[in-house]
Amino acid sequence: MLARRVRSLVVSSMVALLTGCSVSVSSWSLSKSVRSSSRSSDSSSSSSPGAAERAYRDDVSDYTQAYVKSSGGGDLGNFRADLARLAEEHGITNWEENPSTYTAIGEGLAKAGVSSAALMAYKQNLSGGDASKAQLIQQGYDSGR
């Protein structure tokens, strides 16, 4: 259901762009859509171990894919702010030090079909020069392909 909703947003944006219409989809509205959809599926899996962590990773991955597809990877400041809000909703206070965040970003980049050059740029910009974070993004990307 979540993938269908994100895919619908992306397809609608692409159709509008191809037909010359203007599309205004903020990253925050995409993030809210991803979160509200995932919350409805979380209740069925919340009793299993690791379900909360998996739900967070899924949300970050889906949000990353939607963000890249809708904005072309534009303003990373907005992306980071939305990740912070998303993490907060999952009870994660320090998303920047959570390894799952970076693995999920890599998975989302793979689902978005980013090129190798774009992947390198995302790794550099989102890892802040931290080799272990860049490696987690790469691992997520590799597992998501």
Image (tube, rainbow, N blue to C red):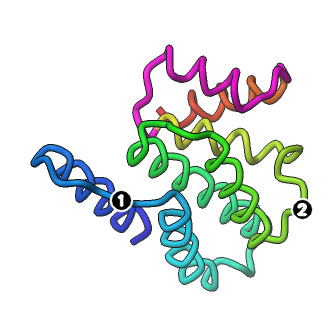
Q: Residue at x 55, y 73 (%)?
A: 38
- Looking at the rendered structure, the kind of residue marked 2 is Thr
As drawn, is 108 to the left or to the right of 130? left
**Classed neighbour count for the residue bearing mark 2: other residues with Cα under 10 Å, few (<14), some (14–19), many (≥20):** few
Q: Position of residue 41 (x, y in %)?
A: 55, 79
Q: Quadrant of the N terminus?
A: bottom left
Q: Relative to 129, is 77 on the left or the right?
A: left
Q: Nearer the viewer, mark 1 or mark 2?
A: 1
Give the Cα separation between the discs numbered 1 and 2: 30 Å
Q: Tag 2's secondary structure?
A: loop
Sequence-first disc among 1 and 2: 1
Where residue 89 appears, as percent x and y from the top left, is 74, 73
Per the image, the residue denoted by label 2 is 93
Q: Is residue 136 above or below residue 29?
A: above
Indicate the position of residue 29 as horizontal and vertical percent values.
49, 68
Label 1 crowd (10 A; few <14 / some 14-19 / many >=20) = few
On residue 119, which mark appears? none
Extent of the magenta region: 111-131
Q: Residue at x 67, y 44 (%)?
A: 77
| SS label for mark 1 | loop
- Considering depth in this image, is 9 or 108 the residue closer to the camera? 9
Residue labelled with disc 1: 24
Q: Nearer the viewer, residue 75 or 31?
A: 75
- Say what amino acid the circle numbered 1 marks: Ser
Q: Is residue 125 magenta?
A: yes
The residue positioned 27% from the left and 54% from the top of the image is: 13
Examine the rendered structure and indicate whether residue 52 appears above or below residue 75.
Answer: below
Q: Which residue is pictured at 45% across the width and 52% down the height?
A: 66
Q: With 97 as the anchor, is 52 left or right in this view?
A: left
